[in-house]
Image (tube, grey):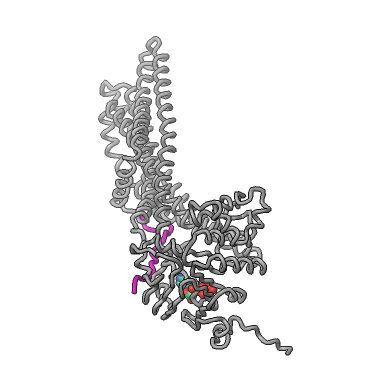
Amino acid sequence: MSDLPESPAPAQPAKDVPISTREALRHGTRLLREVVPLRWKAIALTLLCVVGVSGFTGALANSTKLVVDDVFGAGHQGAALRVALIIIGVAIGKSFFQYFTEVMNVVLKRSVSVGYQKQLFATVIRQELGFFSNQHAATQMVMVQMLGQSAGQAVVDVCNRMTVEILTLLALFTVMVLQDPVLALFACLCVPPILWLVSRLSQRIRTLATTDAGLAAMFFSVGSEVLRGIKTVKSFQLERKSVARFNTAMEALEERGLQFARVTASTVPIIEFLGGLMIGSFVVLASWLIASTDRTAGEFTAFLTAFLMAYKPAERLSAVWVEVQKSLMFVRQMYGQLDRAPQEKPYGTRTLDGAAPSVTLTDVSFSYGEGAPALRDVSLSIAPGERIAVVGRSGAGKSTLIDILQRFYDPQQGQVALGGIDLRELSREGLHDAVALISQDVFLFDGSLAENIAHGHPGASRAQLERAARIAQLDSLIARLPDGLDSPVGPNGSALSGGQRQRLSIARGVAKQAKVYIFDEITSALDGANERAVMAALVSELKDATLIFVTHRASTLAYVDRVLVLADGQVAGFNVADRLMQECPAFRALFQVPEDPQG
Ligand SMILES: Nc1ncnc2c1ncn2[C@@H]1O[C@H](COP(=O)(O)OP(=O)(O)OP(=O)(O)O)[C@@H](O)[C@H]1O
């Protein structure tokens, strides 16, 4: 029959592949094309602030000419006060625009990041089940957070940080040309080789930066895994091992930080030396120009100030470019995720009418990837409204069977049908409305008992919620709680005991009013009395549905019509329990009480 189980490559921390300039431009352009129409007001405001900052920086450099020529040189009456006022005015103007630039930085970064984080999460959640089995949930979430933030960072870096440095350099260069075109030409000849050297160094920094994110994701992944399983860690005395694993991750992070610092630090002395060499040459050239032409000392001072002031934006520009490339590396990864076609299998259009359907498997075989088949040539038929138990040793294929019944996976061979309709012909809603899974892995939402039950049947009446709670034997708990059914359960039901959480999850499943119920080890956290009460209520209240209980407990068998025994992915028996005890060795191995050796 159909497709292999989809196991697309899930989110991985950033790969160690530096981004080429062409790729960086491609992804950067796409990002801006998407962001600009949505946030053009914020971007326009940012650009306005950036033009203000650059313009006032140029003006500040130019004002040194006034200081030298008008204040110190000519000694005009009142010149000092006038020049001082000009300089103060320019500084205030620059600070004003700088303040709003910073504010716009935060606004723009946050809005872009959040927008992409929402898109990424929506893409992740649409993936099929195979996607999630290969990747830690914490890592997935770190990737969603980090990739979204990188998009925000890249936009801010390009629209704000890079633009401000480029415009400031242009403003300062204009001052240099206006004040002394000959020296400006000389600077133009000297600067390119320095820039080439800087770019070589930044390339090295970029390579080191590529694995940063992967290590950061490891920090969360290792730490959160240990903390989530803290009870297991303590009970198996795994503290030392856990700390050792965490320390290894931390040491890798530290080592990377040190390497990064060493390379970054080496750039400063080299640039300082070359800068000093250039300034020395300017002084010699300027003294000759001042002596042999009508150039003033003020012009040279303004030129030199502009040149010296250009050093910082040039340095920051190269740093920002490295950061932009790093951000764009993640943006590339983000688009890789966003562009991944949703792993949704095609669904049909049919729905199930009437009451409980039959469940039929014909020659069904299924393997996870290349491994041994988890189910082999399984053929069976469950009658409408029948109650069956599915039993088998660990790894026999029980969970795989129930995943296939819900079409989480399609088998590679054979056919699965509900009420005689091939599952692939059912619409997505038709299938998931008809089948309810009540799992042993209880997952509850932070809300009231009623809200949690209503997740099974949005829009259910109060009476329907109360009925579901009663079937799940929650009525005595509800009677004790001050707010009854409206009492909060806490995050993932933390205010409830294990058994109460399990019963709440049963109530939610019951409220769904499905036609086929699959109960996966649902009584594992219940005491004997509660288990009997829950099972009796389920079989009497859900008479109009086909019930499938996956179980390891012998006590459950008293409530079912037949028992399906799975062994190594095959049907070892499917009959009433008494007959299986006589005929099926696999069943006896599971449930026969060993004879007392004492006699
Ligand atoms: N996501 C997966 N990837 C690869 N192999 C898997 C996966 N899930 C299950 N298997 C393999 O498929 C086989 C059947 O597993 P399954 O989970 O269906 O058994 P089970 O009867 O439900 O076991 P248990 O009672 O322990 O839950 C096992 O050999 C198992 O190792």
Is 68 above or below relative to 279?
above
Position in image of residue 27 (x %, y %): 32, 49
Relative to the observer, which residue lies in front, 75 or 315?
315
Residue at the spot 33% in from the left edge and 36% down from the top edge: 40
Give left or right: position of 314 versus 251: left
Give left or right: position of 385 versus 161: right
Position in image of residue 527 (x %, y %): 66, 67
Magenta extent = 1-18
Task: Name the outermost residue toward the top.
Answer: 77
Relative to the observer, which residue lies in front, 374 or 319?
374
Position in image of residue 264 (x %, y %): 44, 48
Classify residue 338 by image quadrant.
Answer: bottom left
Mark yes or no: residue 227 visible.
Answer: no
Quarter placement of the C terminus? bottom right
Residue 93 is a magenta residue:
no
Residue 14 is a magenta residue:
yes
Is 189 above or below relative to 172?
below
Task: Name the outermost residue toward the bottom.
Answer: 599
Task: Name the outermost residue toward the right.
Answer: 598
Classify residue 406 by image quadrant.
Answer: bottom left
Position in image of residue 12 (x %, y %): 42, 59
Considering the whole magenta stretch, tell me its main secondary structure.
loop
